[in-house]
Image (cartoon, helix red, strand yellow):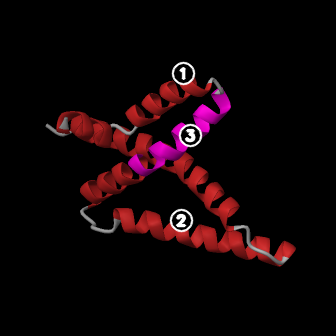
Amino acid sequence: MWDIISAIATIPILPFIIVFIGYEIFIKDRKRAIRMAMDVSTIFFILNVGALFNQLFHIGFGIYGILLVMIIGAGLLGNIHYRKSGNIPWKRIVRVIWRVTFFIMVLLYLILNIYVLLKLAFTV
């Protein structure tokens, strides 16, 4: 059981695939399945990128830095929307920040893993 949980935690693509396939089978709506898989696997990408950042650069604020950037982004987006319309739609802002975080974390996950592989390949 713990082997499955640790594999899911270290390979954040697995929760995305599992949720996507499961949601696609039961709901039969591809667009909603992709969104749900993104929402669920974002937390795994955040944890994994934070851990990779901590391990590679020997700094202990990886996850906290990611959360800080997310909070600052939500504040900036809320400020822009408030100046534009006079109200703050928190649900919409959180959803936008969460989905943007997914794409940034996937990109950082790929970049950091390529960096680790190259570092291992060229150190003897």
Query: Of residues 52 and 23, which is closer to you in this image?
Result: 23
Residue 58, image x, y percentages: 24, 62
**Residue of label 1:** 25
Q: Earlier in the sequence, mark 3 or mark 2?
A: 3
**Residue of label 2:** 70
Residue 27, image x, y percentages: 60, 27
Residue type for callout 2: Met
Q: Nearer the viewer, mark 3 or mark 2?
A: 3
Residue 69, image x, y percentages: 51, 67
Q: Nearer the viewer, mark 3 or mark 1?
A: 1
From mark 3 to mark 2, how far is it between C-alphas? 19 Å
Mark 1 residue crowding within 10 angstroms, few (<14) / some (14–19) / many (20+): few
Q: Earlier in the sequence, mark 2 or mark 1?
A: 1
Residue type for callout 3: Met
Q: Residue furthest front?
A: 26
Start and end of the magenta stretch? Answer: 30-44
**Residue of label 3:** 36
Q: Is residue 118 visible?
A: no
From mark 3 to mark 1, how far is it between C-alphas? 13 Å
Q: Main secondary structure of the magenta part?
A: helix
Query: Of residues 118 and 73, which is closer to you in this image?
Result: 73
**65 lies above or below 52:** below
Q: Residue at x 60, y 67 (%)?
A: 73
Residue 37 on the magenta segment: yes
Residue type for callout 1: Ile
